[in-house]
Image (cartoon, rainbow, N blue to C red):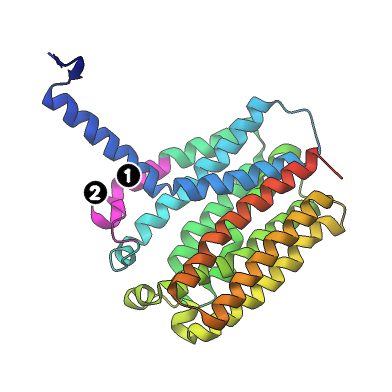
Amino acid sequence: MALIIDKKILLPVNTQSLISRTHNLLQDYLAISKFKVVAMLVLTAWVGLALAPDVGRGMAVQFISLLGIGLLSAAAAVINHVVDSEIDSKMARTRHRPVAKGRLSKIHALSFAAVIGVAGFIMLMVWANTLTAILTLFALVGYAFVYTSFLKRATPQNIVIGGLAGAMPPLLGWVSETNQMAAAPWLLVMIIFTWTPPHFWALAIARKSDYERAKIPMLPVTHGIDFCKTCVVAYSVLLAVVCVLPYLIGMSGLIYLIGACVLNAVFIYKAVKLKIAGNDETAMDLFRFSIIHLMVLFVILFIDKWLPL
């Protein structure tokens, strides 16, 4: 029985141990699912859904559609942890991940991926449409297998080519609503696709020794840090141009245009600062800001939809 001391309930030792193990297991599940990354992907999918033509779908159905996209994205992240476990164990940034550390076995992790992946696919088939389910499954295969198993180890352009899989959520959100492909959501895909290289290369510059140790041909490893910094600046300028396109085609209004210009001005400033007087901290500063940049940019897109100027 539980004891009560000073009005606090002390649970039996075995109960406390069970709660602790359960908490740690849930933390490991969230870690291998890359919960924060998936949350950002779902945010971009939600904006894609919100910008799509209104076809009268209810909020509950829309929520389940986004949940399905999120579950398949999480399944891809789990597979990534399993495939990269040996590499992760060699890198300071990732060596404490659950699969790399051995807290979760590969079979355990893959079983979890199968359960949430199948659940997500069924949700999309039933509450969205077949096209969304297939496109999301293709994105999973592209990230978990084509990028993680092949491109990541084969070419310094890995993140450029493989970035398309991670850029798909806005299109998935749009298609879940309309059951149709369209040009407009592809612009949102282009934004994330262009954003991905400077985002990851900034991290790769700061963690160059990690990638060298793991024998991953990231751009700063194969072509040097200075060349990589130049590429970061070039892609930052390209990103600023791509971010203007939704306004130019009438997809968004002045609120978005102003917000995008401010965000990209800061992005370019930080990229140039990295190029001129960069160090690991400057690179990480750009990396951290790039995450804020993408989240705020898509939030502004949503606000602009409902408060057009």
Query: As drawn, is 36 to the left or to the right of 309?
Result: left
Q: Secondary structure at mark 2?
A: loop
Per the rendered image, the range of residues in magenta is 94-114
Q: Residue at x 42, y 43 (%)?
A: 114
Dividing the picture into quadrants, the one containing residue 216 is bottom left
Calculate the distance from the C-alpha at mark 1 to the C-alpha at mark 2.
Answer: 8 Å
The main secondary structure of the magenta stretch is helix
Q: Residue at x 46, y 84 (%)?
A: 222
Q: Which residue is mark 1?
A: 28
Q: Amino acid at mark 1?
A: Asp
- x and y, in percent, of residue 134 in the image: 61, 47
Query: As drawn, is 284 to the left or to the right of 90?
Result: right
For the residues bearing labels 1 and 2, Cβ distance under 8 angstroms: yes
Indicate whether 295 appears above or below 151.
above
Q: Which residue is mark 2?
A: 103
- x and y, in percent, of residue 105 in the image: 26, 49
Q: Residue at x 51, y 47 (%)?
A: 38
- x and y, in percent, of residue 287 in the image: 52, 64
Task: Pick whichever of labels 1 and 2 is earlier in the sequence.
Answer: 1
Indicate whether 57 appears above or below 87.
above
How crowded is the residue under tag 2: few (<14 C-alpha within 10 Å), some, or many (20+)?
Answer: some
Q: Is residue 227 visible?
A: yes
Q: Nearer the viewer, residue 38 or 142?
A: 38
Query: As drawn, is 221 to the left or to the right of 196?
Result: left
Q: Quadrant of the N terminus?
A: top left
How crowded is the residue under tag 1: few (<14 C-alpha within 10 Å), some, or many (20+)?
Answer: some
Q: Nearer the viewer, residue 185 or 280?
A: 280
- x and y, in percent, of residue 104 in the image: 27, 47
> Is 106 one of the magenta-colored residues?
yes
In the picture as drawn, the residue positioned furthest to the front comes out as: 6
